[in-house]
Amino acid sequence: MSKKKSDKTTIHDIAYELGLNASTVSRALNNNLAVSKKTRELVKAKALEMNYQPNFIAAALRRGRSNTLGVIVPAIDRAFFGRVIRGIEEEADEAGFRVIVCQSFDSSEREREMVDTLRGLQVDGLLISIAKDTGDNLKLYEKLISSGFPIQFFDNVPTSLEVVPAVIIDDRQGGYAATKHLIDQGYKRIAHLRGPQHLHIYRNRYLGYLDAMKEAGLEVNDDSVLEIVSHFDSGEEAFEELWKRSPRPEAIFSASDFSAVSGMKAARRRGLRVPEDIAFMGFSNEPFNELVSPTLSSVDQQPITMGRIASRRAIKAITSKEDEEHPNDQLVLMPEIVVRESSATK
Amino acid sequence: MSKKKSDKTTIHDIAYELGLNASTVSRALNNNLAVSKKTRELVKAKALEMNYQPNFIAAALRRGRSNTLGVIVPAIDRAFFGRVIRGIEEEADEAGFRVIVCQSFDSSEREREMVDTLRGLQVDGLLISIAKDTGDNLKLYEKLISSGFPIQFFDNVPTSLEVVPAVIIDDRQGGYAATKHLIDQGYKRIAHLRGPQHLHIYRNRYLGYLDAMKEAGLEVNDDSVLEIVSHFDSGEEAFEELWKRSPRPEAIFSASDFSAVSGMKAARRRGLRVPEDIAFMGFSNEPFNELVSPTLSSVDQQPITMGRIASRRAIKAITSKEDEEHPNDQLVLMPEIVVRESSATK
DNA sequence: CAAATCATCGCAATCGGTTTCAGGCGGGCA
DNA sequence: TGCCCGCCTGAAACCGATTGCGATGATTTG
């Protein structure tokens, strides 16, 4: 019979069934005290019976609030972002917010499209870790920020702009702590595999390395540092290159876990023992660090905390709106080193 | 001056500026041939000038189509799902569909909430890999399917139901191929670390193992098989347990890469050489398989292909609607083994 | 007993586009 | 000249929920 347009039931349908008006139904479902308790329960029961599903986008359209957060990350299959997103969702959940996640695939072009898409979807706020090549199309973000749109950057944030609301970790401190740890373990000739220096996260890790070396009065010369480009194989090549130099390093601090692991592989292929002959320290605390052997020491970036905080700040900006300007402050998290077999001498 | 309510510009605003009607503007922006070329260009220019951003949800509300796909996975920080999602997005992009991703965290309760949320957001279709403990609340899905709502399951799909539209891989074939590979390499005493048998994916991998062993006339007894529960450490314990038995295995096929890796670790701690003394084969082809040493052979589940196909099928179901029933067919992908150091004798 | 106060609920506008229907206008053709 | 037709645009309904305002009847107050 009614197999035809079973379609969705709306508040009008249930209003009709009950001889009420849609507005009353709406109020009842929202627990509005202006409608009698009896009616409220009646409506709710009927809604359940008719398998009513509220149409969020209709409500969002009317209210101008969707209770939704948009998130843009370079790629969700990177462990770090996966965990950040988990943090974001946890916090959003508690506040009754939904989360939509998009990937920029590290393309600023696509990143812009995603911003438009999400805004078109009427998200109430945006959480973004910008693409690696996003360097110039920041006008978009300037506009958004100055228009008062709630936006929070995290991890990789625009630096060429004035201060933007963001939560980041102190990469320099991370680089410092990692190097300091190696020094404390007794290593003196410590090499650094650094990432592309136009990305401030890698630059800061490098600076932290320099800080620690200088503080300990250890020498750093051109032979101590090597720049790597891609993630995977380059660690092996980098190790071979470093090994050719003299004096040979006793420890290697890599700005990436990936190259640290492949570096270790190259070292072991040469019959070296880790950490007795050479120690390794990575950065990011990837999950696989516990799977490789020896397990790899690293610097944890507190992704879940980062997500939670960014989320909380965005939600606060949304719900408090209209107050005086929200300060474009940056929150800086402190990374924590995680010591494992690859660098533990005792 | 106008710093007050800069708010969003709507088609009404741009219609007003041009002395036109909103309906004309709408048509122009949609490239409707019914409006003259001149007007179309005029409108588009003005829209650009006024920085117009279409309100997708308003359009979706009116059309009943949001051009959006909802995806629910247990956790996006699992490499496999990350890649599936990538496939889904690629395909959706090409068809002009958006994708929003939610996580069930392997809770069927939360999974249900996500379904409601996404439907409230008016997604046009749903792609789901069900939570591990989703076993009984399938009524929801039965309803959805029979109501004609486009839905596609992938990877972990409900089995207690009749046939549901899904794209899965042939785990049994995967288990078979993996075991066959070890046999072809010359190993005879092959043990299997199997996963929880109430999950059909693990059950099928086990059956595939049996198939290959039987086909080759190799013996399988209670000592050949061990069941593991959690991912990480259990591989080491499992290996030790297997090693106590006699005869000792020459090769181990694990239903999970995680336990394979930790199993290898335990083997090497005992001074065994891999694959000379004992070979290892995992399942899922996790990215870290290339990072560990020796690199781990595994079975690739074709996540990107799976995502693309599921996406394409969902979109097809959406756009073709109204036709005769869409068959609830299952598409079965063939896994591919990836041979690496841990099992390559030659 | 009349006036005022509540408690409940309906009416209608609204959010921003989309779409149906109708109509104005100019040109072609008989 | 008259009629038909096609091109282009406007008016208005509509999608589903929210909400300000007003109406109703009941209850309380003076």
Image: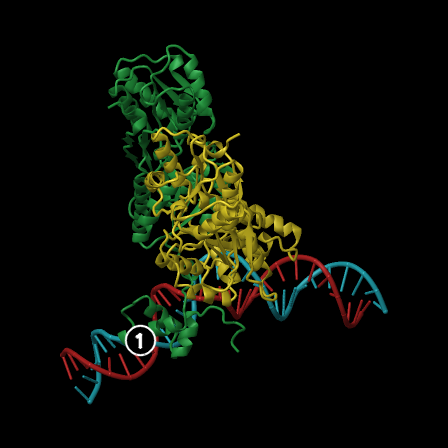
Chain colours: A green, B yellow, C cyan, D red
What is the x, y in percent for residue B158?
45, 59
- Horizontal side of B299 relative to A285 (left or right) equals right
- In this rendering, the answer to whether B149 lies above or below B285 is below
Q: In this rendering, does residue B151 appear at all?
A: yes
Could you tell me the amino acid type at mark 1?
Thr
Q: In which quarter of the image is residue A147?
A: top left
Residue A28, position as x, y percentages in the image = 32, 70
Mark 1 chain: A
Where B151 sits versus A82, above or below? below
Percent position of residue A308, x then y: 31, 44
| Camera-nearest residue between D17 and A2 | A2
Please name the residue that numbered disc 1 is placed on: A39
Eyeballing the image, is B260 above or below D9?
A: above
Dot 1: what SS?
A: helix
Q: Nearer the viewer, residue A236 or B120?
A: A236
Q: Nearer the viewer, residue B201 or A90?
A: B201
Q: How many marks?
A: 1
| Residue B295 occupies quadrant | top left
Label 1, residues with CA under 10 Å away: few <14, some 14-19, many ≥20: some
The image quadrant where one finds the C terminus of chain A is top left
Q: Is residue B19 visible?
A: no
The outermost residue toward the top is A246
Of residues B190 and A243, which is closer to you in this image? B190
Q: Where is residue A54 in the image (x, y as percent from the top left)?
A: 40, 64
Q: Where on the picture, by quarter, is residue A181?
A: top left
Is residue A301 found left or right of B88 in the rendered image? Answer: left
